[in-house]
Amino acid sequence: MPLSEHEQRLLEQIERALVDDDPKFASSVRTGDRRSKARRKLQLGFLLFVVGMAALIGGAVIPSVPLGVLGFLVAFGGLALAVLNYRSGTGVVEAGPGVPAGGSAAGRGGRGGSSKARRQPLKSRLEERFRRRYDQ
């Protein structure tokens, strides 16, 4: 969801103040750097997965248990690296569990189900509070 013009101006002012106060810290936390690092980790994860699968298959063809185990561990580690960096590397946004399409919690009254299934995620609650504050 894009920011309003007012919010964009405020964000730009905050960013300028941060750069003026501490340029070293500001350069280390730029948003563009995070996504490119996550993409590189995602690519590295897929590469490790392919190399690990090749080693696993090689360990099965050549009866070598250590090579097969090493291949499995490398493939598992690569897959874990890829999965952990998929969302931030590709920019995929998923709706959290228990958040209805309208985004409001009003239609979920009653005691049925667990409390976690009925609660909105923290981010959604904070966004809703922020919107209410600026709507007043």
Image: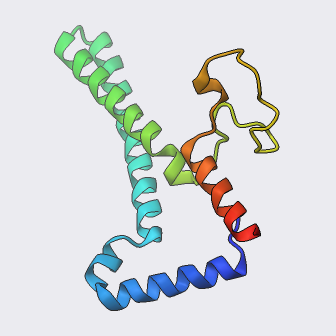
Q: Is residue 66 above or below residue 32?
A: above
- Most extreme residue toward the left is 66
Q: Quadrant of the N terminus?
A: bottom right
Q: Residue at x 34, y 78 (%)?
A: 27
Query: Which picture quadrant has residue 65?
Result: top left
Which quadrant of the view contains residue 11? Answer: bottom right
Q: Position of residue 129 (x, y in %)?
A: 64, 57
Q: Which quarter of the rendering shows the C terminus? A: bottom right
Give the answer, above or below, for where 12 lies relative to 73. Answer: below
Horizontal side of residue 129 vs 39, given as left or right: right
| Residue 10 shown left or right of residue 60 in the figure | right
Residue 44: percent from left, percent from top: 37, 46
Q: Nearer the viewer, residue 58 or 38?
A: 38
The structure residue drawn at horizontal position 31% and vertical position 21%, both measured from the top left corner, is 72
| Residue 112 seen | yes
* Residue drawn at the location 31% of the way across and 73% of the way down: 28
Frontmost residue, 83 versus 52: 83
Is residue 112 positioned above or below 44 on the image? above
Which x, y percent locates residue 49? Answer: 39, 33
Instruction: Tell me, yes or no, if residue 92 can be seen here.
Output: no
Residue found at the far front of this picture: 136
